[in-house]
Amino acid sequence: MDELNQFKSVDDLKKIISHLESFAARPVTRGRHPTLYPEAPDGKYRTIQGIRIIDYKFSTDEKWILPDNQKGLSFSSNWDELKRVYRLIARAKNSSVDVYWVLQGADIPKDMAFVEDKDPKKKGHYFLTVTESITIYKLVQNLKWIADRMTVIRNAERAL
Amino acid sequence: MITFKRYPHVYELISHYAKSLKDNQIINILEKGVSTEDEAVKFANFIWSMADQMAIDCENNVQVFGRTDNSDMMPDVDYEISLYLSNQGFDDVWDKSCDEN
């Protein structure tokens, strides 16, 4: 594996990230999908086909995703946030955590876009939004498509 | 009561662990909010204790909200805690707790 795609410490990770421009990253427990969630049948974090209902604006019949430029899968593009999220995930499960990233300007499906959080206190936090109404099936396909094009920086040794 | 608008389940998660860890100060903070720096530090540090207990629960197959692994909620926790403490005027407390815990 390329040296630039693995890290042994948070400092290593910071060095790799510092070489990236306009990235959007998600730390993920190893073995988990980078853009889809495991099934959760109940609660506010309930999922439909791997998409949390809390992350997107659903139609009332829950078959469509409606456009909203402040709803979407969460991504970090600033180091402080990424480091905190990485450490929290690593602490909450004794397992390796890898970091998946993609360039914000990457070629993503035309009905999706990275949009920065409008809250001035959340600079560097991005949502992977939908820009037009699409079916949940299409969103799942889009998220899988994007996941396939994300680069993973692997935790070579659990870093805390 | 503290309200987390975007990810309201963060409140439920913290409340669950405050009760299971019998931390009355955190139960009180959830009810009344953070108003002093000491409370902000206590609240921030509790999140790391909660994460440790979540790992223990996960290893022991203890179900919380019907799931044994809730680590995928941690980005939501960071989002809400950093925003809440910042809005209360304690911008640096959460970042500092990350480095100290």
Image (cartoon, coloured by chain):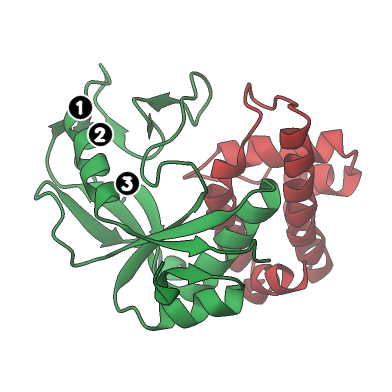
Chain colours: A green, B red
Q: How far apart are marks 3 and 2 (CA)?
A: 13 Å
> Which residue is rendered at x = 65% and y = 46% of the image?
B2
Name of the residue lying farthest toward the front: A1
**Is residue B25 shown left or right of residue A42?**
right
* Callout 2 amino acid: Val
Q: Nearer the viewer, residue A98 or B37?
A: A98
Q: Distance between the residues labelled 2 and 1?
A: 5 Å
Q: Does A33 appear above or below A160?
A: above
Where residue A6 is drawn, which disc sits there? Answer: none
Q: Which of B15 and B64 is in front in this view?
A: B64
Residue A66, horizontal then vertical, whole percent? 20, 35
> Which residue is rendered at x = 73% and y = 27% of the image?
B61
* Callout 3 amino acid: Gly
Residue A13, horizontal then vertical, whole percent? 51, 74
| Same-subunit check for callouts 3 and 1 | yes
Residue B22, horizontal then vertical, whole percent? 90, 38
Where residue A137 is drawn, which disc sits there? Answer: 1
Residue, disc 2:
A140
Secondary structure beneath dot 1 equals helix
Dot 2 and dot 1 residues touching (CB under 8 Å):
yes
Give the chain of mark 2: A
| Same-subunit check for callouts 3 and 2 | yes
**Is residue A97 shown left or right of residue A125?**
right
Give the chain of mark 3: A
